[in-house]
Amino acid sequence: MNVLVVGGGGREHAMIAAIARSRKDPSIYAVMSKKNPGIAELCEDFLLEKETNVEKVVEFALSKNIELVVVGPEAPLAVGLADALEDADISVASPKKKVAQLEFDKAWARNFMRNNNIAGCPVFDVFTDKDAMDAFIDELGNVAVKPAGLTGGKGVKVMGDQLPDVEAAKEYAASLLDQGSVVVEENLVGEEFTLQAFVDGKNLAFMPTVQDHKRAFENDLGPNTGGMGSYNAPGEILPFLTAEDVEGSKQIMIDTVKALYKETGQKYKGTLYGQFMITKDGPRVIEFNARFGDPEAMNVLPLLETDYVDVLAAMASGTLDKLAVKFSKKATVCKYAVPAGYPDHPTKDKEVVVGDIGSAILFYSSVYEKDGKVYTTGSRAVAVVGVADSIEEAEKIAQLALENLSGDLHYRTDIGKGYLIQRRIDHMNKIRGQ
């Protein structure tokens, strides 16, 4: 089978590595804006092109007799790439534009949740007028402010973190009005986690829960990033969650898929990412994404025991219920090496040298290759993943690998460490009044 992956980051490297393990021995092709050396090595051929250039992507897919496509990042979904590929009679395991709105239009997503009585929706409103927005911020008192459009995981600011007080929240919210509507919602208190699922329009196959670490520096300090690393526990439940938390979150995603079809007349096919906050009142939805998380894809895909090509084909054809999707019950810890100064003042064009990384898995992210050498671009560079029977062991494997990368790089050593996880457990026990 000829399979095309659109995207050239760490998430897509993980997806292509999973496809390359397939027993079906597929021929793999890629479209990426710059050459990712890890992806290039696993591909039959690739096109260096903007992933949002729909015409060129479709043209490339047709020229290579592609039978199945999966789209990694969100931007191509927002411009209707999945729709164009299906119009060209190519199977796609990613959602069409109308249902991908769940990610790229936060105002639409919140109103959709409210209109369909989907559980886990925080108190919110959508604004285009400053006076009404200020009054709502005063009323709620503790808020999160979100631009309605795509921001690469960096546009959301919350009080007590990036916004010191109500006045700062009003000022930031007002600064976003030029870009369109602004979502203001209650600032949820609890612990964040990610639940992802393969979806075929009706059936959902869930993956293990993962916790991402957005903050740039140790101890969850510093500015938000696209994600500095993540971990999962053996089995599907993180140490600070209960089985009930996870079941409640699964139900929210099942209801969302059903309501999307009712609301749009279109079936959601592809990976669905639920970013949840577990609160004293159970799971609340921070946001949905219409694709894998990055770094979370790098935790779950190496654990996928079912052939990923079979999973992709089942999502595209609506036959996921005929496939037993299984993950090995192991822990993973993923850690990103990023350019020094990331995210605000990253260094660029610095060589990255990979030494002996032991048993860790390496995924290249935003790098480029020149004369056989790998260089940074200013965004997240390289991720390493440790896989083991315990989080503790997986963390050691990942950390050892990080220490054998050289270049002008920064990383967090604390992701997956026992004391940081214990802090999460204590935090949730306090919230639950235990």
Image: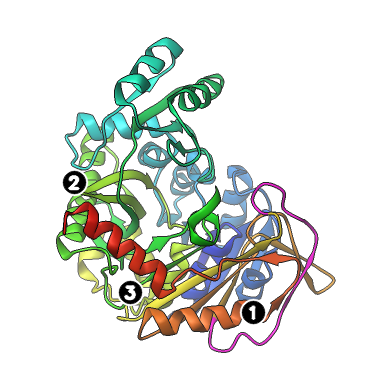
User: Is 345 one of the magenta-colored residues?
Assistant: yes
Amino acid bearing label 2: Asp
Separation of marks 3 and 1 at Cα, in angstroms: 23 Å
Q: Amino acid at mark 3?
A: Ala
Q: Amino acid at mark 1?
A: Glu
In this rendering, is residue 26 above or below 420?
below
Residue that extends furthest to the right in the rendered view of this protein:
371
Provide residue 190's location: percent of width, then percent of height: 30, 50
Crowding around mark 1 (Cα neighbors within 10 Å: few <14, some 14 to 19, many 20+) is some
Q: As displayed, is residue 388 above or below residue 364?
A: below
Q: Which residue corresponds to mark 1?
A: 403
Q: What mark, if any, has residue 233 been given in the picture?
A: 3
The foreground one among 239 and 295 is: 239
- Residue under numbered circle 2: 255
Q: Is residue 289 magenta?
A: no
Q: Which mark is residue 191?
A: none
Magenta residues, start to end: 342-360
Circle 3: element type: loop
Which residue is nearer to you in this view: 134 or 193? 134
The secondary structure making up most of the magenta span is loop
